[in-house]
Image (cartoon, grey):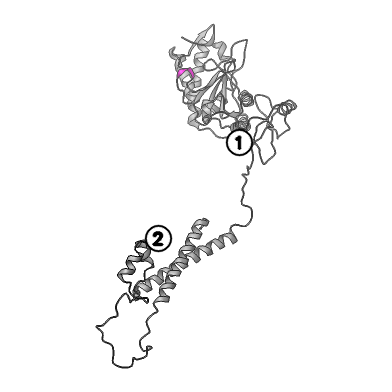
């Protein structure tokens, strides 16, 4: 489809030029008469070996030497250039084959121009009607807060729940809390360059319980049995802080409300121990000097962190202080969290004074199951997990720096 106006005019000009040349050529040299149509000449036939001189003698006569000398001093102009003069010089008549080829090319040029013009007219008549400006429609748009700095084609919806542990009851969308609404109205609108963290604005969805691969469940339970055996023998007070088994629907509700997909090994671990709890004033059990969170604590802590930082400051979410795609699974009590990247599934940690790190303890931990196994190995052998060393002190587990 030709849409360039310049190309359109160039094709038209070329067609006109070709038609003009054909017309001039044909007007100068008419087609020879067909046999039988030319009248028979009277008198004796002309001699065949005699041909008229070419070029013919000029009408005004042949210039003399004096005439040439008289006009030789005239400055040469544009039409005196050899190429221009040769173009306008009288040419011998074209033979039949050459004339026919020229006619064919002229017909092709005219056909191209006609086709291009017809295509342009068809495009204008059929495809150029109406307004073609488009708007992106977001089906099931994510909830948009008043201070988010982005627009949405649907009304924002809020998801809250009123359940209590060990289960989280699912409830329909409700109005925002008065404190949240007043805070949003009192804050100034964010700067235009701030990009909203889409992971902190999940789409509302119904909870769906997903099956866990039995191999993953067996592998996670195997590591937990090693940890439990060591805690019973060396740190019974910490053993008593281990949470009871979680519920699959509770996990599904947390996934729906955060918009995250918990890895199978994390879900299998929560189904065996739903976090840990304070018991008899003992610091609850956890990994790498963090306290294990329950399902509800994971969801609430995720909401808290998204409330603190709901913008994208970098193209790589793993280099920010926080990103909504992370799953907080542990807390050190000082504002830092042990997290799992819901996309890459590896273990990392947040830092209040720096960006997230995915080498907790100075080592790479590729999954939650790998964290369980590294902890069980360190407990049984007296080793370390990175630069953290788990030790039993007065019947409870402590993570120390050796």
Q: Position of residue 334 (x, y in %)?
A: 59, 15
Is disc 2 surrounded by few (<14), some (14 to 19) or many (20+) residues within 10 Å?
Answer: few
Name the one closer to the observer, 323 or 51.
51
Q: In the image, which residues are magenta?
A: 359-363
- 277 relative to 117, above or below: above
SS class of the residue under badge 2?
A: loop
Label 1 vs label 2: CA separation? 89 Å
Left or right of 95, for residue 207? right
Residue 77: which disc?
A: 2
- 96 relative to 143, above or below: below
Residue at image mark 1: 208
Name the one closer to the observer, 328 or 381.
328
SS class of the residue under badge 1?
A: loop
Q: Quadrant of residue 298?
A: top right
Q: Identify the mark nearer the N-term, 1 or 2.
A: 2
Check contact, mark 1 vs mark 2: CB within 8 A.
Answer: no
């Amino acid at each position: 489809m030709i849409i360039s106006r310049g190309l359109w005019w160039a094709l038209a000009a070329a067609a006109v030029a070709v038609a003009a040349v054909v017309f001039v050529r044909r007007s100068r040299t008419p087609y020879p008469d067909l046999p039988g149509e030319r009248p028979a000449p009277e008198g004796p036939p002309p001699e065949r070996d005699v041909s008229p001189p070419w070029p013919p003698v000029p009408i005004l006569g042949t210039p003399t030497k004096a005439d040439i000398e008289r006009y030789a001093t005239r400055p040469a102009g544009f039409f005196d250039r050899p190429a221009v003069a040769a173009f306008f010089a009288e040419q011998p008549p074209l033979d039949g084959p050459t004339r026919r080829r020229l006619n064919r090319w002229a017909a092709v040029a005219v056909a191209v121009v006609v086709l291009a013009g017809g295509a342009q007219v068809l495009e204008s008549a059929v495809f150029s009607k109406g307004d073609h400006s488009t708007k992106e429609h977001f089906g099931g748009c994510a909830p948009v807060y008043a201070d988010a700095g982005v627009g949405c084609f649907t009304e924002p919806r809020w998801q809250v729940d009123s359940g209590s542990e060990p289960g989280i009851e699912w409830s329909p969308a409700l109005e925002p809390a008065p404190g949240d609404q007043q805070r949003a109205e009192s804050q100034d609108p964010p700067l235009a360059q701030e990009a909203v963290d889409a992971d902190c604005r999940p789409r509302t969805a119904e909870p769906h319980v997903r099956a866990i691969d039995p191999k993953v469940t067996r592998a996670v339970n195997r590591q937990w049995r090693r940890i439990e055996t060591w805690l019973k023998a060396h740190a019974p007070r910490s053993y008593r802080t281990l949470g009871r088994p979680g519920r699959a629907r509770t996990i599904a509700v947390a996934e729906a409300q955060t918009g995250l997909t918990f890895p199978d090994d994390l879900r299998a671990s929560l189904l065996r121990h739903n976090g840990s709890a304070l018991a008899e004033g003992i610091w609850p059990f956890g990994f790498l000097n963090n306290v294990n969170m329950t399902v509800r604590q994971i969801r609430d802590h995720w909401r808290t962190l998204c409330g603190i930082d709901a913008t994208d400051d970098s193209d790589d979410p793993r280099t920010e202080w926080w990103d909504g795609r992370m799953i907080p699974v542990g807390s050190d009590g000082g504002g830092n969290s042990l997290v799992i990247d819901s996309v890459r599934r590896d273990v990392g940690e947040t830092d209040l004074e720096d960006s997230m790190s995915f080498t907790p303890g100075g080592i790479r931990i590729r999954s939650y199951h790998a964290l369980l196994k590294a902890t069980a190995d360190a407990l049984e052998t007296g080793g370390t997990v990175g630069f953290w060393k788990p030790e039993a002190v007065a019947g409870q587990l402590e993570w120390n720096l050796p």
